[in-house]
Amino acid sequence: MIYAFTRNPEIKCIGNIFGPSNLRDWDWYSSFNIFLNRKISDVLTEYVGKPWDTIAYREVSPFWKIDSKSTPTITFHGSLDPIVPVYQSRYLHGKLQILGVKNELHEYPTFHGFDQGQTDDAMRKMIDFMKRTLN
């Protein structure tokens, strides 16, 4: 998402599956994830290249980069996701709505992954969204 929102205007649609949108989220950053058996801060420090720094973490967060001209986005997230909190996708959806950016949010009663039926449903919805957006 960050690449599409900030560096590539050629990207016409985004399909976000369980992706974090706000890395500048202290509650998430400072948590320990039993499923990963790691502190989220360790994971994000590897990704960002440095420990907590509000400016650096904001710079790599799609949530803080969107505006009214942002790329249409369809998001899929598990409402029981123990790795990336579902509120990340809800906040992203809400901000895109307020800005008037075409977007959809679909939640599934699952963890950080889909079963086959959910995968099939998500792919149908993503293809439909992209067809409607690109036509």
Image (cartoon, helix red, strand yellow):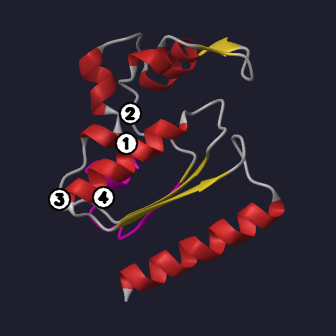
Given this view, does label 2 or label 1 mark the residue nearer the observer?
A: 1
Amino acid type shown at disc 1: Tyr
Residue lying farthest to the bottom in this orientation:
135
Which residue bears the numbered disc 4?
A: 8
> Is 94 rendered above or below residue 102?
above
The answer to whether the residues at label 3 and label 2 have Cβ atoms under 8 Å apart is: no
Q: Tag 2's secondary structure?
A: loop
Amino acid type shown at disc 3: Ser
Given this view, does label 4 or label 1 mark the residue nearer the observer?
A: 1
Name the N-terminal-most of marks 1 and 3: 3
Given this view, does label 1 or label 3 mark the residue nearer the observer?
A: 1
Label 1 – label 3 distance at C-alpha: 15 Å
Label 3 – label 2 distance at C-alpha: 18 Å
> Is 39 rendered above or below residue 129?
above
Name the N-terminal-most of marks 2 and 1: 2
Q: Quadrant of residue 104?
A: bottom left
Amino acid type shown at disc 2: Asn
The answer to whether the residues at label 3 and label 4 have Cβ atoms under 8 Å apart is: no
Picture residue at 50% right of the left edge, 21% below the top: 44
Which residue bears the numbered disc 1?
A: 91
Residue extent of the magenta highlight: 1-16
Label 2 crowd (10 A; few <14 / some 14-19 / many >=20)? many
Amino acid type shown at disc 4: Asn
Please state the horizontal and vertical placement of residue 75, each as a whole percent of the image: 49, 57
The answer to whether the residues at label 2 and label 1 have Cβ atoms under 8 Å apart is: yes
The answer to whether the residues at label 1 and label 3 have Cβ atoms under 8 Å apart is: no
Picture residue at 29% right of the left edge, 22% below the top: 56
Name the N-terminal-most of marks 3 and 4: 4
Which residue bears the numbered disc 3?
A: 68
Which residue bears the numbered disc 2?
A: 22
